[in-house]
Image (cartoon, rainbow, N blue to C red):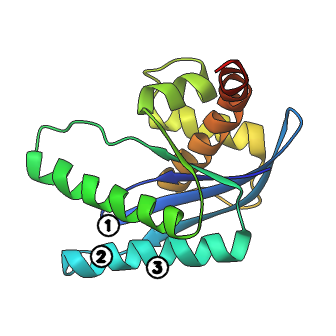
């Protein structure tokens, strides 16, 4: 199973792909979708089209995305929510089911501590996946979201079977 992980941002979003084979995870790809600081509507389009192209190229089976956290700046939180919406829409347009995870859940799954720092998350992602090149912080976070989903799949499958 190929899992797409997404760390949403309005100026740059991290994307990570892993393959899950049994209980083993394997690194596939990571990228950054950079939109800059231009017209916001154009940035949303760039997020949608950039993720759509990655989905077409790598053909993931499922997607997971980090939830928007509440920020002190309401305007920034609204823009981040819209960016996340464009990314979720890109997944939906490609027929992917998207599962959301809170930042705390992602950190707990990868580091074992829900309040871990970003550098701890990046370190564990590098230890688990051994990517062939350095990881930008947002790309490491996206791979962490994919790892989190891989860890939660058995629970989700059991819940579906029971319900």
Residue 145 lies, in percent from the top left, at: 56, 42
- Label 2 environment density (alpha carbons within 10 Å; few <14, some 14–19, many ≥20): many
- Check residue 49 in the rendering and tell me which mark sits there, or answer none: 3
- Closer to viewer: mark 1 or mark 3: 3
Q: Are marks 1 and 2 in contact (CB under 8 Å)?
A: yes
Q: CA distance from mark 1 to mark 3?
A: 14 Å
Residue 134 drawn above or below residue 1: below
Residue 93 drawn above or below residue 79: below
Q: Earlier in the sequence, mark 2 or mark 3?
A: 2
Q: CA distance from mark 1 to mark 2?
A: 7 Å
Which residue is denoted by mark 2 in the rendering?
Answer: 43
Label 1, secondary structure: give it: loop
Residue extending farthest to the right is 22
Residue 57 lies, in percent from the top left, at: 70, 76
Which of the 4 quarters of the picture holds residue 147?
A: top right
Which residue is denoted by mark 1 in the rendering?
Answer: 11
- Pick the quarter of the image with the C terminus: top right
Label 3, secondary structure: give it: helix
Q: Are marks 1 and 3 in contact (CB under 8 Å)?
A: no
Residue 133 lies, in percent from the top left, at: 70, 61
- Check residue 73 in the rendering and tell me which mark sits there, or answer none: none
Residue 66 lies, in percent from the top left, at: 45, 43
Q: Earlier in the sequence, mark 1 or mark 3?
A: 1
Which of the 4 quarters of the picture holds residue 68?
A: top left
The residue closer to the viewer here, 100 or 74, is 100
What residue is rendered at 69% in x and 43% in y?
Answer: 126
Q: CA distance from mark 2 to mark 3?
A: 10 Å
- Label 3 environment density (alpha carbons within 10 Å; few <14, some 14–19, many ≥20): some
Label 2, secondary structure: give it: helix
What residue is rendered at 38% in x and 41% in y?
Answer: 67
Q: Earlier in the sequence, mark 1 or mark 2?
A: 1
């Amino acid at each position: 199973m190929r899992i797409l992980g997404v760390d949403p941002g309005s100026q740059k979003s991290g994307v990570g792909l892993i393959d899950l084979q049994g209980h083993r995870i394997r690194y596939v790809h990571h990228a950054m979708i950079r939109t800059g600081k231009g017209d916001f509507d154009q940035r949303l389009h760039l997020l949608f089209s950039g993720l759509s192209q990655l989905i077409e190229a790598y053909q993931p089976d499922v997607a997971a995305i980090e939830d928007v956290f509440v920020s002190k700046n309401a305007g920034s939180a609204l823009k981040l929510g819209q960016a996340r919406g464009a990314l979720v829409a890109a997944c939906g347009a490609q027929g992917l089911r998207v599962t959301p995870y809170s930042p705390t859940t992602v950190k707990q799954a990868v580091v074992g501590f829900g309040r871990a720092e970003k550098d701890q998350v990046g370190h564990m992602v590098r230890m688990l996946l051994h990517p062939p090149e350095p990881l930008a912080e947002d790309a490491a976070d996206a791979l962490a979201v994919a790892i989190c989903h891989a860890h939660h799949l058995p629970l989700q499958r059991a819940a579906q079977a029971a319900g």
